[in-house]
């Protein structure tokens, strides 16, 4: 059964770059059937989509974060990564990686999630 | 301010039926884009509950049902049980943002 696991530092200093990796346990990130995405959830708040990528190389970012976000993929390691630059305390959140169920954007949902990892931005 | 609007909280007694609304606009639900629902138990990752507005993944009880009309969607939970106490989120695609959007979430309390 497919599993996703987030990893990376739990503490990042303000103005630095947050870097996380998602490792996919089964299957290939190169499949045309899915998007793969990042979502975050500040403590006590709701979910916010950060960005997603498709195997063709296309990436999609939340406009509110676009200037600071980069998503990349290493298919040889079955991993995809998130980089968020110039972080502030408002970027403190649980960060989730997830598989998106369809290559059709308008029907795509997040059907398999990682457990999430808490990243705190503090000096 | 979320693109999709949900009530912050709903409550019901065991055995009762509750509904959670999700209101969007002409660039998301009103454009005909599908709505999906997630259940997030305390301390856990969200779990897909309803997809493409009305479908349940394997293992989700038929007490959970979804509907969509116009610029809104609803999640209904019948026969409330204590273990249904959780946060619920709706999600769709938004053409103005060219990305996926979530509702602000609704906390369900089972009295």
Image (cartoon, rainbow, N blue to C red):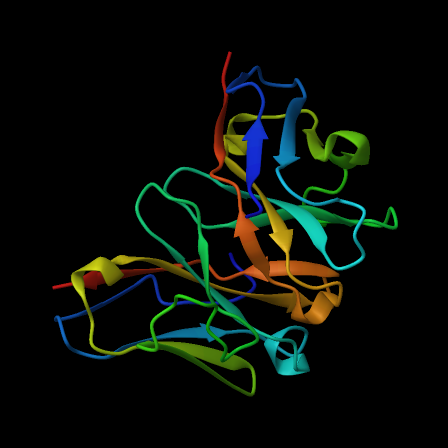
| Relative side of B44 to A119, left or right | left
| Relative side of B30 to B74, left or right | right
B101 is higher (above) or lower (below) than B63: above
Task: Report the front residue among A93 and A109.
Answer: A109
Task: Report the front residue among A55 and A106.
Answer: A55
Q: Quadrant of residue A21?
A: top right
Q: Quadrant of residue A79?
A: top right
| Relative side of A11 to B108, left or right | right
Q: Please state the horizontal and vertical placement of residue B14, each as a whole percent of the image.
A: 13, 71
Total marks shown come to 0
The residue drawn where x is 58% and y is 57% is A110
Q: Quadrant of residue B12?
A: bottom left
Q: Please state the horizontal and vertical placement of residue A106, each as a whole percent of the image.
A: 70, 70
Task: Report the front residue among B100 and A115.
Answer: A115
Quadrant for the C terminus of chain B in the image: bottom left
A57 is higher (above) or lower (below) than A102: above
Q: Please state the horizontal and vertical placement of residue A7, each as a whole percent of the image.
A: 57, 26
The residue drawn where x is 75% and y is 44% is A29
The residue drawn where x is 34% and y is 77% is B62
| Relative side of B98 to B5, left or right | right
The residue drawn where x is 61% and y is 75% is B34
A82 is higher (above) or lower (below) than A55: above
């Amino acid at each position: 059964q497919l599993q996703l696991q987030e990893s990376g530092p739990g503490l990042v200093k303000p103005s630095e770059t947050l870097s996380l990796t998602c490792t996919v346990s089964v299957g290939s990130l190169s499949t045309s059937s899915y998007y793969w995405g990042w979502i975050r959830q500040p403590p006590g708040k709701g979910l916010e989509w950060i960005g997603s990528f498709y195997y063709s190389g296309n990436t999609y970012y939340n406009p509110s974060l676009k200037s600071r976000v980069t998503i990349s993929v290493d298919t040889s390691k079955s991993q995809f990564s998130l980089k968020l630059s110039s972080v502030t305390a408002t970027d403190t959140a649980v960060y989730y990686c997830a598989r998106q169920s369809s290559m059709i954007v308008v029907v795509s949902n997040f059907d398999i999630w990682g457990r999430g990892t808490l990243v705190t931005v503090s000096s | 301010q979320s693109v999709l609007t949900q009530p912050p909280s709903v409550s019901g007694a065991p055995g009762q039926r509750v509904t959670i609304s999700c209101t969007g606009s002409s660039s998301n639900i009103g454009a005909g884009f599908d709505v999906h629902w997630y259940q997030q138990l305390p301390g856990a990752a969200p779990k897909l509950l309803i997809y493409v507005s009305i479908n349940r993944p394997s293992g989700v009880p038929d007490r959970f049902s979804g509907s969509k009309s116009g610029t809104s969607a609803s999640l209904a939970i019948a026969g409330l049980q204590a273990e249904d106490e959780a946060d619920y989120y709706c999600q769709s695609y938004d053409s103005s943002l060219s990305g996926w959007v979530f509702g602000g979430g609704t906390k369900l309390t089972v009295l």
